[in-house]
Image: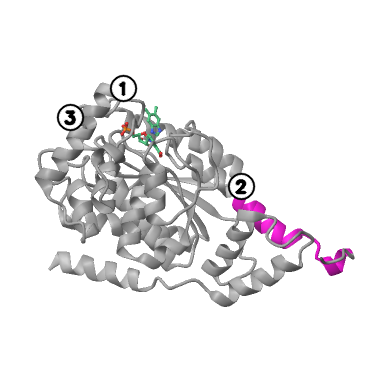
Amino acid sequence: MVQSNLCTQFAHEIGRIRPLDDEAMRMTDVRLGNLTKPPGSLGKLEDIARQLAGITGEVDPDLSRKAIIVMAADHGVCAEGISAFPADVTPQMVMNFLSGGAAVNVLAKQAGADVVCVDIGVNAELEHPDLYARKLMHGTNNMAQGRAMEHDTAVQALLTGIELVETLWNKGYRLFATGEMGIGNTTASAAVMSVLTGCSPEEAAGRGTGIDDARLAHKIEVIRRSIAINEPNVEDPFDVLGKIGGLEIAGLAGVILGAAARRCPVVIDGFISSAAALIAARMAPDAVQYMIGSHLSNEQAHKKLLDAIGLAPVIHLDMRLGEGTGAALCFHLIEAAQRLLREMATFDSAGVSRG
Ligand SMILES: O=C(O)c1ccc[n+]([C@@H]2O[C@H](COP(=O)([O-])O)[C@@H](O)[C@H]2O)c1
Ligand SMILES: Cc1cc2nc[nH]c2cc1C
Protein backbone atom coordinates (compact mmCIF):
# COMPACT_ATOMS: atom_id res chain seq x y z
CA MET A 1 0.00 0.00 0.00
CA VAL A 2 2.72 2.44 1.05
CA GLN A 3 4.79 1.32 -1.92
CA SER A 4 1.99 1.87 -4.43
CA ASN A 5 1.36 5.31 -2.90
CA LEU A 6 4.99 6.32 -3.42
CA CYS A 7 4.94 4.96 -6.95
CA THR A 8 1.77 6.92 -7.74
CA GLN A 9 3.41 10.16 -6.56
CA PHE A 10 6.42 9.35 -8.67
CA ALA A 11 4.39 8.50 -11.77
CA HIS A 12 2.53 11.81 -11.40
CA GLU A 13 5.83 13.71 -11.42
CA ILE A 14 7.17 11.83 -14.44
CA GLY A 15 3.92 12.56 -16.27
CA ARG A 16 4.65 16.30 -16.03
CA ILE A 17 7.79 16.04 -18.19
CA ARG A 18 7.12 17.35 -21.69
CA PRO A 19 9.22 17.77 -24.84
CA LEU A 20 10.97 21.12 -25.34
CA ASP A 21 9.14 24.23 -26.60
CA ASP A 22 9.79 24.35 -30.38
CA GLU A 23 8.47 27.88 -30.83
CA ALA A 24 10.80 29.34 -28.16
CA MET A 25 13.75 27.56 -29.81
CA ARG A 26 12.75 28.89 -33.24
CA MET A 27 12.57 32.45 -31.87
CA THR A 28 16.01 31.99 -30.33
CA ASP A 29 17.39 30.83 -33.69
CA VAL A 30 15.99 33.97 -35.32
CA ARG A 31 17.64 36.14 -32.66
CA LEU A 32 20.96 34.27 -32.96
CA GLY A 33 20.80 34.71 -36.73
CA ASN A 34 20.48 38.51 -36.38
CA LEU A 35 23.51 38.93 -34.08
CA THR A 36 26.75 40.35 -35.49
CA LYS A 37 28.55 37.07 -36.20
CA PRO A 38 28.65 34.45 -38.95
CA PRO A 39 25.79 31.95 -38.48
CA GLY A 40 26.62 29.24 -35.93
CA SER A 41 30.02 30.75 -35.09
CA LEU A 42 29.39 30.69 -31.34
CA GLY A 43 29.12 26.91 -31.55
CA LYS A 44 27.96 25.16 -28.41
CA LEU A 45 27.11 28.48 -26.75
CA GLU A 46 24.37 28.84 -29.38
CA ASP A 47 23.20 25.29 -28.66
CA ILE A 48 22.97 26.13 -24.96
CA ALA A 49 20.98 29.33 -25.61
CA ARG A 50 18.56 27.38 -27.83
CA GLN A 51 18.21 24.58 -25.29
CA LEU A 52 17.54 27.03 -22.42
CA ALA A 53 14.71 28.55 -24.46
CA GLY A 54 13.27 25.13 -25.29
CA ILE A 55 13.41 24.11 -21.65
CA THR A 56 11.89 27.24 -20.14
CA GLY A 57 9.65 28.37 -23.01
CA GLU A 58 11.31 31.83 -22.87
CA VAL A 59 14.00 33.24 -25.17
CA ASP A 60 15.70 35.06 -22.30
CA PRO A 61 14.77 33.28 -19.06
CA ASP A 62 15.87 34.60 -15.66
CA LEU A 63 18.17 31.85 -14.37
CA SER A 64 19.98 34.04 -11.85
CA ARG A 65 19.08 31.88 -8.83
CA LYS A 66 21.05 28.69 -9.15
CA ALA A 67 21.66 25.78 -6.79
CA ILE A 68 24.12 22.90 -6.78
CA ILE A 69 22.41 20.07 -4.94
CA VAL A 70 25.14 17.98 -3.30
CA MET A 71 23.74 14.64 -2.17
CA ALA A 72 25.88 12.74 0.33
CA ALA A 73 25.61 9.06 1.21
CA ASP A 74 27.66 6.06 2.26
CA HIS A 75 28.07 2.68 0.61
CA GLY A 76 28.11 -0.69 2.37
CA VAL A 77 30.25 -2.03 -0.47
CA CYS A 78 33.19 -0.08 1.03
CA ALA A 79 33.61 -3.11 3.32
CA GLU A 80 35.05 -4.86 0.26
CA GLY A 81 37.96 -2.39 0.05
CA ILE A 82 37.14 -0.71 -3.26
CA SER A 83 38.20 2.90 -2.53
CA ALA A 84 41.51 4.63 -1.88
CA PHE A 85 39.94 6.47 1.07
CA PRO A 86 38.12 5.37 4.26
CA ALA A 87 34.33 5.78 4.46
CA ASP A 88 34.79 8.28 7.33
CA VAL A 89 35.68 10.86 4.68
CA THR A 90 32.02 11.10 3.60
CA PRO A 91 30.73 12.72 6.85
CA GLN A 92 33.97 14.70 7.21
CA MET A 93 33.52 16.21 3.76
CA VAL A 94 29.86 16.98 4.48
CA MET A 95 31.00 19.13 7.41
CA ASN A 96 33.58 20.71 5.08
CA PHE A 97 30.81 21.59 2.55
CA LEU A 98 28.81 23.13 5.39
CA SER A 99 31.80 25.22 6.53
CA GLY A 100 32.37 26.42 2.98
CA GLY A 101 35.83 24.88 2.60
CA ALA A 102 35.36 22.33 -0.20
CA ALA A 103 36.22 22.87 -3.87
CA VAL A 104 32.55 23.06 -4.80
CA ASN A 105 32.00 25.89 -2.30
CA VAL A 106 34.75 27.94 -3.92
CA LEU A 107 33.53 27.32 -7.48
CA ALA A 108 29.87 27.83 -6.57
CA LYS A 109 30.69 31.17 -4.95
CA GLN A 110 32.59 32.29 -8.04
CA ALA A 111 29.59 31.33 -10.21
CA GLY A 112 27.04 33.03 -7.93
CA ALA A 113 25.41 29.71 -7.03
CA ASP A 114 24.33 28.24 -3.71
CA VAL A 115 25.47 24.85 -2.44
CA VAL A 116 22.61 22.81 -1.02
CA CYS A 117 24.11 20.03 1.08
CA VAL A 118 21.87 17.01 1.62
CA ASP A 119 22.42 14.04 3.94
CA ILE A 120 20.40 11.35 2.17
CA GLY A 121 22.27 8.41 3.67
CA VAL A 122 25.47 9.23 5.50
CA ASN A 123 26.60 6.69 8.09
CA ALA A 124 27.03 9.24 10.91
CA GLU A 125 24.83 11.56 12.92
CA LEU A 126 25.22 14.99 11.37
CA GLU A 127 23.86 18.26 12.64
CA HIS A 128 24.19 21.71 11.14
CA PRO A 129 21.65 24.50 10.63
CA ASP A 130 22.30 24.55 6.85
CA LEU A 131 22.17 20.78 6.36
CA TYR A 132 19.17 19.38 4.52
CA ALA A 133 18.66 16.32 6.76
CA ARG A 134 16.95 13.67 4.64
CA LYS A 135 18.68 10.51 5.86
CA LEU A 136 16.93 7.34 4.64
CA MET A 137 19.56 4.82 5.79
CA HIS A 138 22.96 4.88 7.47
CA GLY A 139 24.59 4.02 4.15
CA THR A 140 23.44 1.28 1.80
CA ASN A 141 23.89 -2.41 2.54
CA ASN A 142 26.89 -4.17 1.00
CA MET A 143 25.66 -4.91 -2.53
CA ALA A 144 28.26 -7.66 -2.89
CA GLN A 145 26.21 -9.65 -0.35
CA GLY A 146 22.65 -8.71 -1.29
CA ARG A 147 20.50 -5.75 -2.36
CA ALA A 148 21.83 -2.26 -1.52
CA MET A 149 18.43 -0.99 -0.35
CA GLU A 150 14.75 -1.89 -0.40
CA HIS A 151 12.76 -1.02 -3.51
CA ASP A 152 10.68 1.39 -1.42
CA THR A 153 13.78 3.18 -0.14
CA ALA A 154 14.95 3.76 -3.70
CA VAL A 155 11.58 5.31 -4.55
CA GLN A 156 11.75 7.43 -1.37
CA ALA A 157 15.20 8.66 -2.39
CA LEU A 158 13.89 9.59 -5.84
CA LEU A 159 11.00 11.47 -4.23
CA THR A 160 13.44 13.21 -1.87
CA GLY A 161 15.29 14.63 -4.87
CA ILE A 162 12.00 15.81 -6.37
CA GLU A 163 10.91 17.35 -3.06
CA LEU A 164 14.19 19.28 -2.78
CA VAL A 165 13.80 20.74 -6.26
CA GLU A 166 10.24 21.74 -5.42
CA THR A 167 11.38 23.40 -2.16
CA LEU A 168 14.12 25.29 -4.00
CA TRP A 169 11.81 26.18 -6.91
CA ASN A 170 9.44 27.75 -4.38
CA LYS A 171 12.38 29.87 -3.15
CA GLY A 172 13.01 31.13 -6.69
CA TYR A 173 15.77 28.82 -7.92
CA ARG A 174 15.48 28.12 -11.65
CA LEU A 175 18.81 26.52 -12.59
CA PHE A 176 20.03 23.35 -10.93
CA ALA A 177 23.19 21.26 -10.90
CA THR A 178 23.92 17.83 -9.50
CA GLY A 179 26.74 17.15 -7.08
CA GLU A 180 27.58 14.29 -4.73
CA MET A 181 29.86 12.98 -2.03
CA GLY A 182 30.12 9.32 -1.13
CA ILE A 183 33.19 7.18 -0.65
CA GLY A 184 32.60 4.04 -2.74
CA ASN A 185 30.09 5.62 -5.10
CA THR A 186 32.12 5.07 -8.28
CA THR A 187 31.69 1.32 -7.63
CA ALA A 188 27.89 1.62 -7.42
CA SER A 189 27.84 3.96 -10.43
CA ALA A 190 29.95 1.57 -12.51
CA ALA A 191 27.66 -1.33 -11.56
CA VAL A 192 24.61 0.69 -12.64
CA MET A 193 26.34 1.65 -15.89
CA SER A 194 27.38 -1.92 -16.62
CA VAL A 195 23.84 -3.26 -16.21
CA LEU A 196 21.98 -0.44 -17.98
CA THR A 197 24.35 -0.09 -20.93
CA GLY A 198 25.34 -3.76 -21.24
CA CYS A 199 29.06 -3.01 -21.03
CA SER A 200 31.38 -5.20 -18.93
CA PRO A 201 32.45 -4.30 -15.35
CA GLU A 202 35.98 -3.80 -16.78
CA GLU A 203 34.69 -1.16 -19.17
CA ALA A 204 32.62 0.61 -16.49
CA ALA A 205 35.05 0.62 -13.56
CA GLY A 206 37.65 3.33 -13.06
CA ARG A 207 40.11 4.49 -10.45
CA GLY A 208 37.68 6.69 -8.47
CA THR A 209 39.61 8.49 -5.74
CA GLY A 210 42.85 7.01 -7.14
CA ILE A 211 43.16 3.24 -6.64
CA ASP A 212 46.12 1.23 -8.00
CA ASP A 213 45.98 -1.61 -10.54
CA ALA A 214 45.53 -4.36 -7.95
CA ARG A 215 42.63 -2.60 -6.25
CA LEU A 216 41.05 -1.81 -9.62
CA ALA A 217 41.10 -5.53 -10.52
CA HIS A 218 39.46 -6.26 -7.16
CA LYS A 219 36.85 -3.50 -7.70
CA ILE A 220 35.92 -5.06 -11.05
CA GLU A 221 35.51 -8.44 -9.36
CA VAL A 222 33.31 -6.88 -6.63
CA ILE A 223 31.11 -5.24 -9.29
CA ARG A 224 30.83 -8.56 -11.13
CA ARG A 225 29.88 -10.36 -7.89
CA SER A 226 27.33 -7.65 -6.93
CA ILE A 227 25.59 -7.97 -10.29
CA ALA A 228 25.65 -11.79 -10.17
CA ILE A 229 24.19 -12.04 -6.67
CA ASN A 230 21.45 -9.43 -7.20
CA GLU A 231 20.45 -10.18 -10.80
CA PRO A 232 19.08 -6.67 -11.46
CA ASN A 233 16.50 -6.44 -14.23
CA VAL A 234 17.97 -4.29 -17.03
CA GLU A 235 14.45 -3.32 -18.13
CA ASP A 236 13.60 -1.92 -14.68
CA PRO A 237 15.66 1.08 -13.50
CA PHE A 238 13.97 0.94 -10.04
CA ASP A 239 15.22 -2.61 -9.63
CA VAL A 240 18.73 -1.64 -10.73
CA LEU A 241 18.76 1.34 -8.34
CA GLY A 242 17.51 -0.68 -5.37
CA LYS A 243 19.85 -3.62 -5.86
CA ILE A 244 23.16 -2.04 -6.93
CA GLY A 245 22.63 1.74 -6.71
CA GLY A 246 23.25 4.32 -4.03
CA LEU A 247 21.08 6.71 -2.04
CA GLU A 248 22.77 9.79 -3.54
CA ILE A 249 22.48 8.31 -7.05
CA ALA A 250 18.74 7.76 -6.52
CA GLY A 251 18.32 11.21 -4.95
CA LEU A 252 20.09 12.88 -7.87
CA ALA A 253 17.95 10.98 -10.38
CA GLY A 254 15.00 12.53 -8.51
CA VAL A 255 16.60 15.99 -8.72
CA ILE A 256 16.98 15.62 -12.48
CA LEU A 257 13.40 14.41 -12.98
CA GLY A 258 12.05 17.12 -10.65
CA ALA A 259 13.90 19.83 -12.58
CA ALA A 260 12.60 18.51 -15.91
CA ALA A 261 9.04 18.39 -14.54
CA ARG A 262 9.34 22.10 -13.59
CA ARG A 263 10.90 23.07 -16.94
CA CYS A 264 14.25 23.92 -15.35
CA PRO A 265 17.67 23.16 -16.83
CA VAL A 266 19.80 20.75 -14.81
CA VAL A 267 23.56 20.59 -15.25
CA ILE A 268 25.06 17.12 -14.88
CA ASP A 269 28.42 16.92 -13.12
CA GLY A 270 30.77 13.90 -13.35
CA PHE A 271 30.64 10.10 -13.40
CA ILE A 272 28.31 9.52 -10.44
CA SER A 273 25.92 12.30 -11.49
CA SER A 274 25.90 10.76 -14.96
CA ALA A 275 24.92 7.36 -13.53
CA ALA A 276 21.98 9.18 -11.91
CA ALA A 277 21.23 10.87 -15.25
CA LEU A 278 21.19 7.48 -17.00
CA ILE A 279 18.67 6.19 -14.45
CA ALA A 280 16.54 9.31 -14.96
CA ALA A 281 16.77 8.91 -18.74
CA ARG A 282 15.54 5.31 -18.52
CA MET A 283 12.63 6.40 -16.31
CA ALA A 284 11.65 9.38 -18.50
CA PRO A 285 13.43 9.64 -21.88
CA ASP A 286 12.21 13.24 -22.42
CA ALA A 287 14.17 14.29 -19.28
CA VAL A 288 17.42 14.10 -21.31
CA GLN A 289 16.47 17.28 -23.15
CA TYR A 290 16.53 19.15 -19.83
CA MET A 291 20.08 18.00 -19.02
CA ILE A 292 23.22 19.95 -19.85
CA GLY A 293 26.41 17.87 -19.83
CA SER A 294 29.10 19.88 -18.04
CA HIS A 295 32.56 18.32 -18.13
CA LEU A 296 34.29 15.12 -19.11
CA SER A 297 35.60 13.49 -15.95
CA ASN A 298 38.90 11.62 -15.91
CA GLU A 299 37.01 8.58 -14.63
CA GLN A 300 37.78 6.38 -17.63
CA ALA A 301 34.20 5.25 -18.40
CA HIS A 302 32.65 8.71 -18.30
CA LYS A 303 32.68 9.32 -22.07
CA LYS A 304 30.92 6.03 -22.74
CA LEU A 305 28.37 6.77 -20.02
CA LEU A 306 27.62 10.23 -21.45
CA ASP A 307 27.28 8.69 -24.93
CA ALA A 308 24.74 6.20 -23.57
CA ILE A 309 22.66 9.11 -22.24
CA GLY A 310 23.18 11.26 -25.34
CA LEU A 311 25.06 14.10 -23.61
CA ALA A 312 28.09 15.99 -24.89
CA PRO A 313 30.31 17.64 -22.24
CA VAL A 314 31.46 21.21 -22.89
CA ILE A 315 34.51 21.31 -20.58
CA HIS A 316 37.58 19.02 -20.50
CA LEU A 317 39.80 19.83 -17.53
CA ASP A 318 40.93 16.33 -16.44
CA MET A 319 38.91 16.75 -13.24
CA ARG A 320 37.64 13.74 -11.26
CA LEU A 321 36.46 15.24 -8.01
CA GLY A 322 32.68 15.17 -8.17
CA GLU A 323 30.84 17.39 -5.60
CA GLY A 324 29.34 19.37 -8.50
CA THR A 325 32.65 21.07 -9.35
CA GLY A 326 32.43 20.54 -13.13
CA ALA A 327 28.82 21.65 -13.12
CA ALA A 328 29.73 24.83 -11.21
CA LEU A 329 32.22 25.76 -13.95
CA CYS A 330 29.56 25.13 -16.59
CA PHE A 331 27.35 27.78 -14.96
CA HIS A 332 29.78 30.39 -16.33
CA LEU A 333 29.26 29.12 -19.89
CA ILE A 334 25.49 29.12 -19.44
CA GLU A 335 25.67 32.72 -18.29
CA ALA A 336 27.96 33.53 -21.23
CA ALA A 337 25.40 32.07 -23.66
CA GLN A 338 22.64 34.15 -22.08
CA ARG A 339 24.65 37.38 -22.08
CA LEU A 340 25.59 36.99 -25.74
CA LEU A 341 21.97 36.55 -26.73
CA ARG A 342 20.89 39.48 -24.55
CA GLU A 343 23.69 42.00 -25.12
CA MET A 344 25.17 41.54 -28.60
CA ALA A 345 24.29 44.04 -31.30
CA THR A 346 22.30 42.93 -34.35
CA PHE A 347 23.43 43.47 -37.97
CA ASP A 348 20.79 46.20 -38.27
CA SER A 349 21.50 48.01 -34.96
CA ALA A 350 25.27 48.02 -35.58
CA GLY A 351 25.09 48.74 -39.31
CA VAL A 352 27.09 45.63 -40.18
CA SER A 353 26.55 44.03 -43.62
CA ARG A 354 25.12 40.51 -43.78
CA GLY A 355 26.88 37.92 -45.95
O1 LIG B 1 32.50 12.90 -10.46
C1 LIG B 1 33.42 12.18 -10.84
O2 LIG B 1 33.65 12.00 -12.03
C2 LIG B 1 34.25 11.47 -9.79
C3 LIG B 1 35.25 10.60 -10.19
C4 LIG B 1 36.01 9.98 -9.22
C5 LIG B 1 35.74 10.22 -7.85
N1 LIG B 1 34.74 11.05 -7.48
C6 LIG B 1 34.47 11.32 -6.05
O3 LIG B 1 35.20 10.40 -5.26
C7 LIG B 1 34.36 9.66 -4.40
C8 LIG B 1 34.17 8.27 -4.95
O4 LIG B 1 35.38 7.63 -5.26
P1 LIG B 1 35.59 6.13 -4.75
O5 LIG B 1 36.97 5.78 -5.22
O6 LIG B 1 35.51 6.18 -3.25
O7 LIG B 1 34.51 5.33 -5.36
C9 LIG B 1 33.05 10.38 -4.35
O8 LIG B 1 33.00 11.20 -3.22
C10 LIG B 1 33.02 11.17 -5.64
O9 LIG B 1 32.46 12.45 -5.43
C11 LIG B 1 34.02 11.69 -8.43
C1 LIG C 1 39.07 14.37 0.25
C2 LIG C 1 37.97 13.97 -0.73
C3 LIG C 1 37.09 14.95 -1.22
C4 LIG C 1 36.07 14.55 -2.11
N1 LIG C 1 35.10 15.22 -2.72
C5 LIG C 1 34.39 14.38 -3.45
N2 LIG C 1 34.89 13.17 -3.30
C6 LIG C 1 35.93 13.22 -2.49
C7 LIG C 1 36.81 12.24 -2.00
C8 LIG C 1 37.84 12.63 -1.13
C9 LIG C 1 38.76 11.57 -0.61
What residue appears at the point 47 percent right and 42 percent down from the top-left corner?
A: 296
Instruction: Give the Cα distance between marks 2 and 3.
Output: 39 Å
Which comes sooner in the sequence, label 2 or label 3? Answer: 3
Q: Quadrant of residue 282?
A: bottom left
Instruction: Give the Cα distance between marks 3 and 1.
Output: 15 Å
Residue 173 visible to an observer of this rendering: no
Where residue 212 is drawn, which disc sits there? 1
Q: Compared with residue 38, is residue 20 higher up or lower down, i.e. above or below?
A: below
Camera-near label (3 vs 1) is 1
Is 57 positioned to the left or the right of 30 in the image? left
Characterize the magenta stretch by its predominant secondary structure. helix
Residue 263 x %, y %: 48, 67
Q: Quadrant of residue 71?
A: top left
Task: Write down the residue under mark 3.
Answer: 80
Task: Write down the residue under mark 2.
Answer: 332
Q: Compared with residue 305, is residue 54 higher up or lower down, i.e. above or below?
A: below
Q: Compared with residue 80, is residue 58 higher up or lower down, i.e. above or below?
A: below
Q: Amino acid type of disc 2?
A: His
Which comes sooner in the sequence, label 1 or label 2? Answer: 1
Is 286 positioned to the left or the right of 81 in the image? right
Q: Amino acid type of disc 3?
A: Glu
Which comes sooner in the sequence, label 3 or label 1? Answer: 3
What residue appears at the point 61 percent right and 47 percent down from the top-left corner?
A: 332
Judge: label 3 CB < 8 Å from ligand 1.
no
